[in-house]
Amino acid sequence: MMTQSGNPEIQEKGQSNLIASFGSLAKANEYLIGQEKT
């Protein structure tokens, strides 16, 4: 949803939330890849 938004403010807020939760976008991506396998 964040990446499909045409609104840069929503994209930045979503990115900030992911970094706050996972420490980095790379860690968030690793988590998502792990979830796809289960």
Image: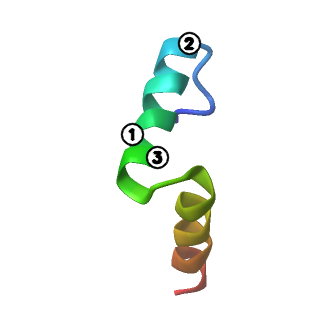
Q: Residues within 10 Å of mark 2 (few under 14, many from 20)?
A: few
Compared with residue 6, is residue 26 higher up or lower down, i.e. above or below? below
The CA span between labels 1 and 3 is: 5 Å
As shown in the figure, which amino acid type bears the numbered disc 3?
Answer: Ile
Which numbered marker is on residue 17? 1
Cβ–Cβ under 8 Å for marks 1 and 2: no
Does label 1 or label 2 sit earlier along the sequence?
A: 2
Q: To which residue does mark 3 refer?
A: 19
- For residue 6, side relative to residue 13 (left or right): right
Counting residues from the start of the chain, the first of labels 3 and 2 encountered is: 2
**Where is residue 4 shown, x and y percent of the image?**
62, 29
Q: Position of residue 1 (x, y in %)?
A: 52, 36
Q: Quadrant of residue 34?
A: bottom right
- Which callout, 3 or 2, points to the residue nearer the camera? 3
In x, y percent, where is residue 29? 61, 61
Is label 1 or label 2 in front?
1
Q: Which labelled disc corresponds to residue 7?
A: 2
Disc 1: CA contacts within 10 A as few (<14), some (14-19) or many (>=20): some
Residue 32 percent coordinates (x, y)? 55, 66
Q: Amino acid at mark 2?
A: Asn
Circles 3 and 2, Cβ within 8 Å, touching? The answer is no
Q: CA distance from mark 1 to mark 2?
A: 16 Å
Q: Secondary structure at mark 2?
A: loop
The residue lying toward the viewer, choosing from 4 and 26, is: 26
Q: Nearer the viewer, residue 14 or 26?
A: 26
